[in-house]
Structure formats: C-alpha cells, structure tokens
C-alpha cells in the first residue's frame, strides 16, 4: 500500500480529502508500473502549487495481487474466464480495515463527500461497485475505461437495485471510442441506470475523448481534470 501526503501536510494542521486508487503499482513509480505510471504525485504537487483552493489530498494506492487481479477486482465471477469473485472481500477490506486505519493515523476528512475511489479497466469496475454498494463511504467515484464487459448484467443489476441509491455521490466516467466497440455503449448504459435511480445529471460527468486509448498515458493525462471535478465543492 502506497501513501501520498500533500506538500503542506507536515506544516499545516489541515484535514484532507482522501483518494483511494487501485493498481497501486502504476500510480506513482515508473519502476514498479506494468505499462507506464499515472504520475499522480507529480500532478497533485503541480496542482497544489498553482491552483488556489485546490487544497490537495491524501492518496492511498493499493497494489493489485498480480495474477489474482481479475479475481480481486470483480465481486462477480466471469464463467467464461473462470475469474472474479473476490471483489466483495477486497472492498470490505477497504471499508472495514484500511479506511478506518487511514482516518485514525492521518488528518483526513472522513465523510463520503471527501472520500473518492478511482481506477481504470477492472479498477474502474471495482470503483463503480464500491461507490454504489457503499455510498455512505465513497461519495466520489472515478471510473476510467471500465471493464464492464467482465460482468455487465451484474453491474447493471447492482446499479438498478442497490439501496440506498447513491444520489449524493459524484461519478466521473471516462473512455475512448477506440477502446473497442462495447466500451462506450456499456459505460453509457451504466450512466443511464444511475440517472434512472435519481442521480442528478449534474453529478455525473461522462467523457469520451476521441484520442482516448486503453493505456496508462491516457489515464495519466485525464487524472488531473477528474480529480479536480470530483472534489470540487
């Protein structure tokens, strides 16, 4: 588990929002990354230096389990791939063990409005799951290039039936049309299901940049705008 603290953490008494990110290997460091890093630390340092009122945040990045990644990042089993099914336990670990530890040991703003969860591909799927299943914990949800194909019917059922509906939350959806024929349509279906549940359209941002690809450079480029929108009051 990787931890990033804002540049002024040691010199201020402030409390900070927290962002939970999956695939921790790819977030900060080229050396541990699978296919390029997200450069989250550089982006946040830059934003805190230049933007009035972008008050910085604590980032908690959780490594994936390597070959177990598909199992960890879906609560549902994909029968064709014989993968998935451990996502429920993974998110329970975040909610019941990791978040309480972080809130106890660091100056955080622990409420849902100041707690975000974000990831790409399978990490996008598990972020959406966490945000819909635990809206009282994760009130800001970043869904990049989500692998909804892995368990699409189950994802839609969750959004349609989970109570309470996440009406106070914000959702940031991002994918490129070049990521395959089902990527953007699947993402649109999930967005529409959230709208039907009563999430206001002002609380959903749905972006499909024409050059977007299923790649770390794309997610790195888009991280800053997504972070700023999610935590904007």
Image: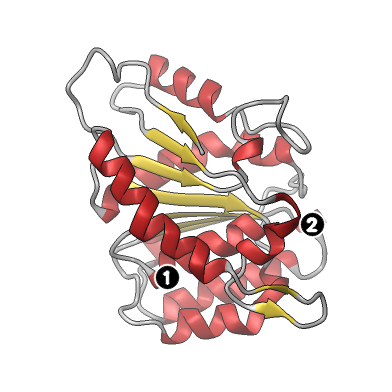
- Front residue of this view, candidates 200 and 68: 68
Going by the image, does 127 lie left or right of 217? left
- The residue beneath circle 1 is 132
Q: Residue 197: x percent and y percent?
A: 39, 80
**Residue at image coords 51%, 39%:** 1
- The residue beneath circle 2 is 179
Q: Comparing marks 1 and 2, which lies closer to the viewer?
A: 1
Number of numbered tags placed on the structure image: 2
Q: Are marks 1 and 2 in contact (CB under 8 Å)?
A: no
Q: Quadrant of the C terminus?
A: top left
**Residue at image coords 74%, 49%:** 210
- As drawn, the label of residue 118 is none
**Residue at image coords 39%, 49%:** 98
Q: Is residue 108 visible?
A: no
Residue 45, compared with residue 148, is above or below; it is above
Residue 56, compared with residue 26, is above or below; it is above
- Front residue of this view, candidates 224 and 124: 124
Q: Residue 151: x percent and y percent?
A: 67, 77
Find numbered disc 2 in the image and state the secondary structure of the residue it sits on. helix
């Amino acid at each position: 588990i990787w931890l990033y603290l804002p540049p002024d953490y040691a010199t201020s008494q402030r409390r900070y929002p927290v962002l939970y990110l999956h695939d921790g290997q790819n977030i900060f460091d080229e050396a541990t990354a699978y296919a390029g890093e997200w450069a989250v630390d550089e982006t946040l340092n830059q934003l805190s230096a230049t933007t009035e009122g972008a008050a910085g945040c604590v980032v908690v990045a959780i490594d994936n389990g390597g070959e177990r990644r598909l199992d960890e990042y879906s609560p549902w089993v994909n029968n064709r791939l014989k993968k998935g099914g451990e996502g429920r336990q993974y998110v329970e670990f975040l909610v019941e063990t990791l978040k309480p530890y972080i809130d106890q040991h660091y100056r955080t703003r622990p409420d849902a409005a100041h707690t975000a969860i974000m990831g790409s591909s399978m990490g996008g799927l598990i972020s959406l799951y966490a945000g819909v299943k635990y809206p009282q914990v994760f009130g800001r949800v970043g869904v990049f290039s989500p692998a909804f194909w892995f368990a699409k019917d189950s994802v839609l059922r969750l959004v349609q039936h989970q109570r309470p509906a996440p009406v106070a939350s914000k959702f940031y959806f991002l994918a490129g049309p070049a990521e395959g024929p089902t990527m953007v349509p699947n993402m649109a279906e999930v967005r529409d299901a959230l709208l039907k549940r009563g999430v206001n359209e002002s609380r959903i941002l749905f972006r499909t940049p024409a050059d977007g690809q299923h790649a770390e450079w794309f997610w790195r480029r888009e991280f800053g705008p997504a972070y700023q929108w999610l935590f904007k009051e």
